[in-house]
Image (spheres, coloured by chain):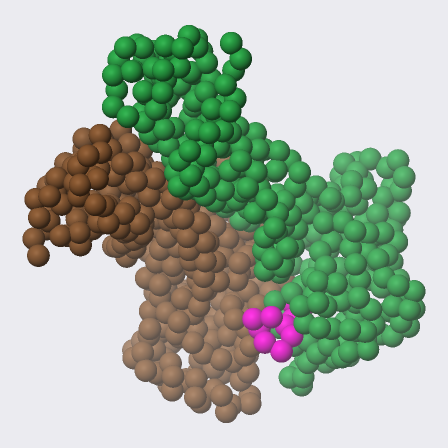
Amino acid sequence: MRLPPLSYNVRSLFVRWSSTLLTVIGIGATVAVLSGVLALQQGFSRLYTEGGRADTAIFLRPGATNESESAIQREQAQILIKETPEIVRADDGQALAAGEIYLAVRQRKVDGGGETNVAIRGVQPPSFEIAGVEIVEGRRFELGNDEVVIGQSLVGRIQNCKLGGEIQLNTSPFKVVGIFRSAGPAGSEIWGDVDRLGPILERPNFSRVVARVQKPEDVAAIAARLDGDKRIPAKVISERAYLSAQTLFLSATLVVLGTFLAVVMGAAAVFSGMNTMLAALASRTSEIGVLLALGFRPFAIFLGFVFESLVLGLLGGVAGVLMALPLHGVRTGTTNFQTFTEVAFAFQITPPVLVVAVGFSMILGLVGGALPAFRAARMEPCEALRHR
Amino acid sequence: MRFPWLLVVLNIVGHPLRALLTLASLTVAFFLLCVLTSVLGGLEAGIKASANDRLVVQSAVSLFVALPQSYGGKIKTVDGVEEVVRWQWFGGYYQDPGNFFAQFAVDHDRLFDVYPEIKIDEAAATAFAQKRTACLVGKELARRYGFKPGDRLPLIGTIFARLDGQAWDLDVVGIYESTGANVDQNTVFFRYDYLDEVREAGLCGGPEGVGVYVLALEEGAVPEGVAARVDALFQNGPQVVNTTTEAEFQRQFVSMLGNVPVFLGSIGGGVMFAILLAVLNTMLMSARERTHDFGILKALGFQSGVVFALLLFESIGLCLVGGVAGITLALITAPVLGAGLSSILPNYAIAQETQLMALGLSGLIGVVAGVLPGLRAMQLEVVDALRAEV
């Protein structure tokens, strides 16, 4: 079976350029919305998944799903660290482990001055190495002093979050002496000495214990042992698993929202795309008659028109991605509802987003084009030729 | 000459498939607009319904830091304060951590004085006053899980975990209804004195203290003045407090959503833009195909303005019908969507203002989409128009 020249269908799109353009922009808007929502989801979940290591163990109270609702008594933390041989130790026997406290504190935003919840973490010196955070400006806080270091993402977003700034916690001011970089959510946190912050924030217990273990499989081994240990009420999870669990709720919400919007807006786009193709068909009835008279099979004509509408959809998809592309890298903040703290991240137009966006636009084209193409294929050659 | 109204209708009906497709996309677009606006409205409903004469005292440091028990008595003496109710977030779960709903321990003897919008029947009130383990369940929550008075409600504590690992057994004594959007119907209220008793006995973990104090003000008291006096009372510690109106307190949870309202707004804008292009496209097609008709109309002596108005009215008519259909669809689906969203967005409803806004916008889109084809048709020369292919 010979297909009609596909260039005929493509050129037809350009002959009716104004109507093509309107349809392309219409499909484009739909695709852009879908890409935007997905880019938000990607940015948020990447922040959490890329920062997590499989060989970092996180100890929480059994039953706690995140550190804001967890508590481990300090004596138990000591026993835990001492009696876990899998934890990496320096030559002098110092374990690469730390007890930390975690709390969402109220701070004012720079723009608008509204309040938001910022995560504050009381840490011990090994925390820096375990989390892989690196001071980029200033220095670390001195133990025992009312000093803190802040994540880079807070600078310019939260009031007083700059070198030399003062962060008020209850009745005590804390001085910002350093700024650190972190690929993960720690980039939106404030860090200080756990022994200073504990009493001020009324957190006598640790929220969690973190430790670097020798190999990723150790986490499961520790978990099995802790399960049967009545003295230490704690559970263990790898940092990677912990962080990706944090994104489940928001990711699921965004995927549901994106799907809902895509289906509803997609339906509207299909209807109007179908209209465009039907009008195109009506004005080209005699051309179809010529094609049929030349001996092209109806099914070949059907395929030709489906192809034309697929190209229309594809153009819409490209337009949509182009509309959404400026979002890439734009920083925004949202609340992690597991811990009630705000984290900053950037929209990410990743390859999966592109694939879904372009695939979706082609589906729109296909669905919108099928009926008109079917109509075209069923025309009687004589009547079509007679049509003016 | 009379305006040919019938032609407007005939032009729409004369091309049924195209009209239907355009109407379908209009319907979908305005349905979506109504849904998005109502989600935003639902978020704000709690703030709007909040009472002006109620204040909330919370820690100035963090939502998660409790206030000392001793604060209650001190706050009660502040000028302008009528009554004080303690609220403590319990944060437990029922059977599975995925079953999320709010539970608060409250002062059972004062809650209803401060919150007249919470309605319970006589029997429930009596039982709540007499039984230490009593709890009240919101109407929506009761519907969701089938709770009824007389049931036992076992809650696993996370913050206030029992040291023996068991659940807190509460007794459902009544179902409450709320007449204000500021108190949702998905909450469990139980007695603060019971929580306190178990904690005092050393049977559970959790912070000693009070999450927030809610104040009812005396008549005529100025809320800002009272708030400033309460804040001043504790400005040197041990816990610095932040006193706000109930509306401000609710707003902080909405503002946690960050840019979500902006996202929803821009999606709505995108939808409207796309639908404008779709209708414009339809109208241009419609006008192009009827060039010949316009020639005849003009030759018959109809003014150019009539030709313009024909297309304009056709466009407005299409859009209004589509808009009304979209609004209707949103209204029909509201109970289903509302039930589905009730746990995260209890106040989803298609407000009258939303309907009016959607209707107005549909008319506006009709005008904008009709003007360009209308102007084109107006400028046609009779001879050219008549010569145009049908």
Q: Quadrant of the N terminus of chain A?
A: bottom left
Whole-percent x and y of residue B90?
A: 69, 67
At x 22%, y 34%, the residue is A387
Q: Is residue B95 shown in magenta? A: yes
Q: Is residue B316 above or below residue A90?
A: above
Residue at horizontal 33 percent and vertical 73 percent from the top: A54
- In the displayed structure, B330 sits above or below B170; it is above
Relative image position of residue A298 (x, y in whole percent): 17, 51
Q: Is residue B181 magenta?
A: no
User: On the picture, is A293 further left or further right than A57?
Assistant: left
Q: Position of residue B169 (x, y in %)?
A: 74, 79
Q: How many marks?
A: 0
Q: Colour of chain B?
A: green
Q: Is residue B100 left or right of residue A224?
A: right
Q: Is residue B157 visible?
A: no
Residue at the image position 76 percent from the left and 79 percent from the top:
B152
Give the main secondary structure of the magenta stretch. loop
Q: Position of residue B201 (x, y in %)?
A: 77, 79
Q: Which residues are magenta?
A: B90-99
Residue B260 visible in the snapshot:
yes
Q: Judge by depth and name the residue closer to the eye, B306 or B68.
A: B306
Depth check: A41 or B370 in front?
B370
- Figure quadrant of the C terminus of chain A: top left
Foreground of the two, B23 or A108: B23
Residue at the spot 51% in from the left edge and 68% down from the top edge:
A66
Give the quarter of the image for residue B178.
bottom right
Instruction: Locate residue A269: give its quadrant.
Output: top left
The chain painted brown is A
